[in-house]
Image (cartoon, helix red, strand yellow):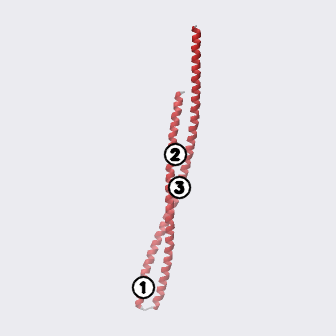
């Protein structure tokens, strides 16, 4: 009886350890979730900034194209010195336009990369939510098992105390019978 009680106590201790480990995993999962959400928020802000930059770049490209058109139109009307100066300006504007186009393509790449990262973070977040739910279920199961084991131990202890009382009563009665038999 005592050995069974001892075994049950050890099993309860093991279950408490398992419960603590599960709670620790759940806390780590929560921390990782918070970090992922923070990273996701940062990536969204970067995406918004990239989109604003892309829009302003598009506007700048349109303005530069309009200026190029105006300059080409005025070239026809002005003399050769002005033409040379305007051609130089057109080349400068063309180079600036090319640089802006390159910057725009880089921004588009960055936006796509950020969107991919956001999708990965969202997937990771959902996986962490699933793991947390699983851990919570394990914790609930272990707590239920511990409660059942405690009840069983209490029943065994109660049964043991009853048996001890009966043993003492029987011993006392045996002593009384011996005393009566000796008299």
Q: Which residue is mark 3?
A: 125
How crowded pointer 1 is (Cα within 10 Å; few <14, some 14-19, many 20+) is rated as some
Q: Residue at x 47, y 66 (%)?
A: 110
Q: Position of residue 143 (x, y in %)?
A: 56, 41
Residue at 51%, 67% (x, y): give it: 48
| Percent coordinates x, y for residue 77 in the rendering | 46, 91
Residue contact between numbered discs 3 and 1, judged by CB atoms under 8 Å: no
Mark 3: secondary structure: helix
Q: Nearer the viewer, mark 2 or mark 3?
A: 2
Tell how many labels: 3
Q: Is residue 3 above or below residue 15?
A: above
Q: Which residue is mark 1?
A: 87
Give the label, 2 or 1, closer to the camera. Answer: 2
Mark 2: few, some, or many residues within 10 Å (few <14, many ≥20)?
some
- Res. 180 image quadrant: top right
**Which of label 3 and label 1 is nearer to you?**
3
- For label 2, the residue is 23
181 left or right of 75 in image: right
Q: Quadrant of the N terminus?
A: top right
Q: Position of residue 158 (x, y in %)?
A: 58, 29
């Amino acid at each position: 009886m005592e050995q069974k009680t001892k075994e049950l106590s050890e099993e309860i201790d093991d279950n408490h350890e398992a419960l603590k480990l599960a709670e620790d995993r759940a806390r780590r999962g929560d921390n990782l979730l918070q970090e992922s959400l923070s990273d996701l928020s940062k990536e969204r802000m970067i995406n918004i900034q990239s989109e604003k930059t892309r829009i302003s770049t598009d506007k700048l490209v349109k303005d530069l194209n309009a200026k190029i058109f105006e300059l080409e139109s005025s070239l026809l009307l002005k003399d050769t010195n002005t033409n040379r100066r305007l051609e130089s300006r057109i080349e400068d504007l063309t180079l600036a336009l090319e640089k802006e186009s390159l910057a725009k393509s880089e921004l588009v790449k960055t936006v796509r990369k950020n969107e991919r990262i956001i999708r990965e973070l969202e997937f990771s977040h959902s996986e962490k939510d699933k793991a947390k739910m699983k851990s919570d279920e394990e914790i609930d199961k272990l707590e239920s098992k511990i409660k059942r084991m405690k009840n069983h131990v209490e029943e065994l202890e109660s049964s043991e105390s009853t048996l001890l009382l009966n043993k003492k009563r029987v011993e006392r009665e045996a002593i009384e019978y011996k005393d009566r038999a000796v008299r």
